[in-house]
Image (cartoon, grey):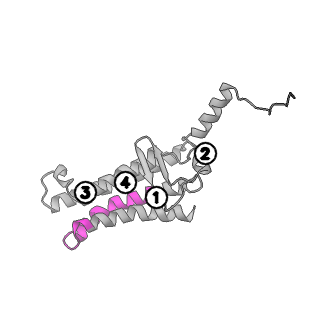
Amino acid sequence: MTDSPEPHEERLGRAEADRLIAASLDLSGAALTGRQRALRCAAFAATVAVWGVLTAQVVFSRNLDLLLSGLADPAVAGGLLMLVALAWFSFFCHETLPGYYDENRSSFVTRGPFRMNLGCLMRVHNGNWPVICRAARWSAATAAVLLPTLELALGDVLPITMVGLLGCAVFFVPILVAGKLSE
């Protein structure tokens, strides 16, 4: 019997393995500067203020007794949903994805309660994710303001479902276009 040399195996120590795992799962990316955070807060506050004024006009023009009953209106509910999306993409969404998004073909992003699935439309990776986040912030702010504006201007002409569909298009189409162009 001959003794053949065993293939060389490199074993990582526990500390090195933990460091590699933490680096691959790191979602934090670069922290926002004070100026960036201030600009995002100001943009969010301005969008909420404009949405609030427009929503109040929708509620009063439709003779709804309370804002809660106004939430049955798709323009009001849709605008509120867009404000939630704007808050997520402005303050909680990290603009750096873990390394496995770059290494694998993935069309979805998931983190905590947040799920974004783009289906077969595009691959999500660190090359296009910051662009998608920026487009999501702009389109969410635009849709939040546009929904009650459309309701006020065309609420008697357009069906309520059409106003909601236009709001969805204003939110999703820029995200898809921006992500696809930078893919």
Is 22 on the left or on the right of 109, as rendered?
right
Q: CA distance from mark 4 to mark 3?
A: 17 Å
What's under tag 4, amino acid-wise?
Ala
Which residue is denoted by mark 2 in the rendering? 99
Q: Which residue is mark 3?
A: 76
Q: Residue at x 50, y 55 (%)?
A: 107
Q: Residue lying furthest top in this view?
A: 14
First along the sequence among labels 4 and 3? 4
Q: Which mark is residue 46?
A: 4
Q: Earlier in the sequence, mark 4 or mark 1?
A: 4
Residue at 37 percent across and 54 percent down: it is 46
Residue density around tag 2, few if under 14, some if 14–19, many if 20 or more, within 10 Å: some
Tell me which amino acid carries mark 1: Gly
Distance from Cα at disc 3 to Cα at disc 1: 28 Å
Residue 63: % across, % down: 12, 59
Segment colored magenta: 135-161
Seen in the picture, residue 138 relative to 31 is either above or below; the reply is below
Q: Secondary structure at mark 2?
A: loop
Q: Which residue is mark 1?
A: 119
**Which disc, if any, is residue 33?**
none
